Image (cartoon, helix red, strand yellow):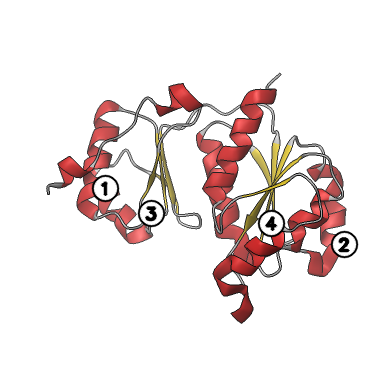
Amino acid sequence: MAADDEVLLDFARQGRTGLAEAVFCSGKRVEQLDVIASRVTGEQRPMLFTRLDAGTYDRLHEKYPALSDYDEASQTLAYRPAPMHESCAVAIVSGGSSDVPVSREASRTLAFYGHPSLVIDDVGVAGLWRLLERLPEISRHKVVIAVAGMDAALPTVLGGLIGAAMIAVPTSVGYGMVRGGETALQSLLVSCAPGVTVVNIDNGYGAACAAIRILNQVRD
């Protein structure tokens, strides 16, 4: 089957849900991504590409120079993002430097939709003072995305300290028994901090989309 027949883009999704379709690039053939890039740039449709490795991006950018807003840390590519809002309603807090790719995926997704975010990295509970020093800043935001691997204690600790909507992202960071993030996920699912929303392992994109759904309902 030709790549043209394997791609059917949903440009009307944002009108239905408030969230446009994003292209999850991992597992897609270059030919499929080429079809998507051609349609997106040809019609000048906003699009966010996630899990796009640097080598594949270079090949797309060479053919479609308009696809230039690429971030290697998060492996995201943003085309025609929305204008940025003036107010910052979301804080993204990560436990360690190894969680940065997931944290950046969340911040880049928010930025694509025009939402600025406060990003605070490497404030895990092993050095609790680092988190407590930033707590006044964090607590001023309506939504907090907490990104953590290992035992994923950070979202639970934050959930007991602030009243913001809390979205937890378990990551696959850690040794042996972390089991690719499954231990972190299970830890968060039994969190004793009530009201913590949990997304899938390493899913910074999904956490950002959850935050946007919340903000769309509480917008002043």
Q: Earlier in the sequence, mark 1 or mark 2?
A: 1
Would you place residue 122 above or below residue 91 in this image? Answer: below
Q: Earlier in the sequence, mark 2 or mark 3?
A: 3
Percent position of residue 168, x then y: 67, 51
> Dots 1 and 3: beta carbons under 8 Å?
yes
| Nearer the camera: disc 2 or disc 4 | 4
Q: Using the image, tell me which numbered label, if any, was put on residue 129.
A: 2
Q: Which of marks 1 and 3 is nearer the N terminus?
A: 1
Residue at (60% x, 32% y) in the render: 213
Question: Mark 4 = which residue?
Answer: 189
Q: Is residue 95 visible?
A: no
Q: Identify the image quadrant of residue 26.
A: bottom left
Question: Mark 1 = which residue?
Answer: 33
Residue at (86% x, 50% y) in the render: 160
Question: Residue reaching furthest top?
Answer: 220
Q: Is residue 69 visible?
A: yes
Question: Mark 3 = which residue?
Answer: 52
Percent position of residue 63, x then y: 22, 46
> Dots 3 and 4: beta carbons under 8 Å?
no
